[in-house]
Image (cartoon, rainbow, N blue to C red):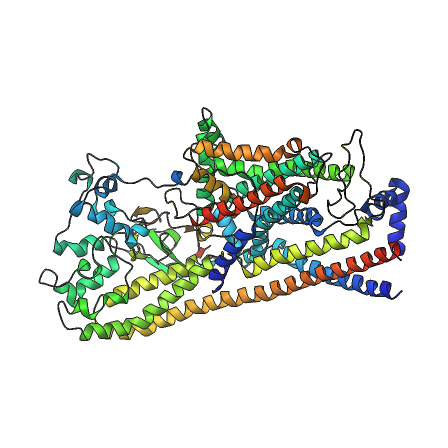
Amino acid sequence: MGLGRKIGDYLDLRLGIRDILEQNLTRYLLPRNINAWYTLGAVLFTLFALQFATGILLLVYYNPTADEAFRSIQRIMNEVPYGWLIRTVHAVGANIIILALLMHMLSVLFMGSYKAPRELTWVAGFLLLLLSLGMCLTGYLLPWSQLSFWATTVATSSSGEIPLVGDVVLRFLRGGAMVGQPTLGRFFALHVMGFPLIFGLLVLIHLFCVRRVGISRPPFGPEWHPAEPPVTFHHEEHPDGIPFFPHYVAKDGATIAFFLALLLAVVFFAPGLFFPPASFEPADPFTTPRGIKPEWYFLWAYQTLKIFPNEFLGLAVQGIALILLLLLPFLDRSPERRPARRPLFVSVYFFGIALFIALSVWGHYS
Amino acid sequence: MQRSSRRKFLVSLLGSLGAAAVGIATYPVFKYLAPSRSDERGGRITIPRAQVGVGQAHFFQFQGHPAVVLQRSPGVFIALSAICTHLGCIVKWVSEKGEFLCPCHAGRFSSDGKVLSGPPPRPLPSIPVAISGENLLIG
Amino acid sequence: MTGTGAAQRTYRYLQLIFFLVTLIARVDPAAAQTAETVCIQCHGSQPGRLGAPVREWQTSIHAANGISCHNCHGGDPTDVAMAMSPERGFLGVPNERAIPGFCGRCHVGVQEDYLASAHGRALGKGGPQCVTCHGNHAVLNASPDLINPKDCSRCHDYGRAGEIKSAVLETDRRITELERQLLSLRHIGIATREMEGELFALRNRFHRLFHSVDVEKVRSQTAGFQTELGKISGRIAEVEAKLNRRKLWGGAMVVLLVGCGILSLLIYRSYREEIDRSQHP
């Protein structure tokens, strides 16, 4: 107790640290009826921290050249002590993160938490989702396996369908006419530096928005009523709420532990779940493996492109869907957040989920 | 009062489980970063020069993998991996032709390991050789 | 590894529970096609005798391993006009006596043992050559099923052939089983290339051995092959023991984390009860 207290006193005297901690932990009150879905933010924070840590560790042995990349991953998986663990956690972690991101977004949509005054939180969050998918896409190429090579070839090729500038865009993405060393170079730079830096900045903005505006109250229970649209800045307080620490931290901790348990369960008991056989063959530009499919979270887009007769049309539809989602809080401006009073939105919501699942399953079996 | 002692118990239990989990997680990271000892094991191999006549090949195990050393011309030695780069069969030395032949799919390699014909995608990797008196130091 | 089937089922199941509305991705299946040689472009669309080889070849082990028309028949697969010109090394159809040499350009070992065998010595005098048993364009991965009463008794009675078959069957079964094990290890990222190479070389030596069609020779060498197979299967067993140890630790870690989660929930509930009681006494 003695030493801890002394350090606390020292810091408190100079930085007023106890006040900050109290304001953000014990005196930071959350809505009383806050539910488990609200813990997904903390889960994502932990999972991304794990990705950063394992990513940095992988950089120690990874070699970003077309000649060496595959072999360096093989070495990590087979020769470096516990390399298999670090690498599998990183790769499986990416999939678990996408799952958690989708759940996070869906819960925000369902509870209408994106509505005014939280539009900016939504926009930052949606950009984080897109950036995460970008990190998945760029990370996919780095092992330089058959899967990496052909999935990237396929994924970049349809940008060539954009009218007028398609070819330029395609060559710019690949750094040349074909996927090769130039592609690996730029994807590597984006994956380990470019995207993570922007990502960190966006996380700060997202968290700042969350903290500054205040946690939204779940729109359930008899006492919930839509608030008047704000005319001045207003921090949403919950005077009768539960403290963030220790109450809600315990709940956050529980969900985090369950998610980590899920991650490790996949890593140890189904390590091949997210690795098709082609991910363990070195890239060969002259042999197209059979049945190259994108990751499960891109299958819906893969199938959309196959449905439309014209690829550009498919791309345009996807682009419009993304933009609509990004701008949703500016289009859907009614203050009502109770799902029972938003029948149209809720029907579209479930239709969207069903469509996503149907397209993905179709894409998987087609 | 009873509740708070129960909670104290839960918190200390969680603390010890959490510490155990962190401890277990730290060990792999430490091992991952620890310098590898296999470099120091080295695995240099000594072979008497007399075993490798001019134009002759001598097959041996190098770091657990089949390898071959060859005296191409008097005093000029070359050591190569003996594993065909196509499907992993062991190449044979055809001394009449002065080249390696893989018996599985007729891949042919020159005496310095370059692919002459057949399906092998890459040359045979070479291994450094040095002469030390009457011995060859390989590796 | 019974995990693969379960993993696939889990994968499908996960897809069913994962949901969402939108993301990015650009995927074009048509872009991922290999260039066809001019041989296949022309012959593939021809009916009857001229097109049949392409369709047969497509089912073959050669097609699966990327061995195309020109790899055996020569010629220029990139130039329509000169594709079948002897100047570019076009060989066309070998006559019967030339077939062992034709296939033996790649299958050197088998050719050697075959030529020295009773089969090979009868080449051109009614004896069988490669195509007699293996077929030509629809050539399949060789298996002991090729030795069967129906095919062998086209020329002689099945007796000795049957003896050879029973002599090779067990070794062949073990080779196939080890191949399968190595493949499933490869699919979870274990470096099996070297073991696969050894096994392939062994399989290759074993296959050339029984082309000598000499029962005594096959029997006397089988023990040696079995010993070598035993070494490979010992190494596979080591890998699998290592994987099981990992699972043990992983399982413990999962249990530990689930325990942490449950404890956190209990702690949360105790705080929650306290606050509810203080506000509604």
Seen in the picture, residue A108 relative to C137 is either above or below; the reply is above
Please provide percent x and percent y for residue A78.
Answer: 52, 57
Residue A234 visible (yes or no):
yes
Total numbered labels placed on residues in the image: 0
Please provide percent x and percent y for residue C52.
Answer: 20, 48
Please provide percent x and percent y for residue B44.
Answer: 48, 58
Please provide percent x and percent y for residue C16.
Answer: 53, 52
Nearer to the camera, C39 or C112:
C39
Residue at image position (52%, 37%) is A185
Residue at image position (22%, 35%) is C80
Nearer to the camera, C256 or A77:
C256
Nearer to the camera, B114 or C127:
C127
Identity of the residue furthest to the left in this view: C125
Nearer to the camera, C53 or B88:
C53
Residue at image position (27%, 56%) is B94
Seen in the picture, residue C188 relative to A206 is either above or below; the reply is below
Quarter where residue C31 is shown:
top left
| Quadrant of the frame with the N terminus of chain A | bottom right
Quarter where residue B10 is shown:
bottom right
Residue C92 visible (yes or no):
no
Query: Going by the image, does C83 lie left or right of B65?
Result: left
Query: Going by the image, does B82 lie left or right of B27?
Result: left
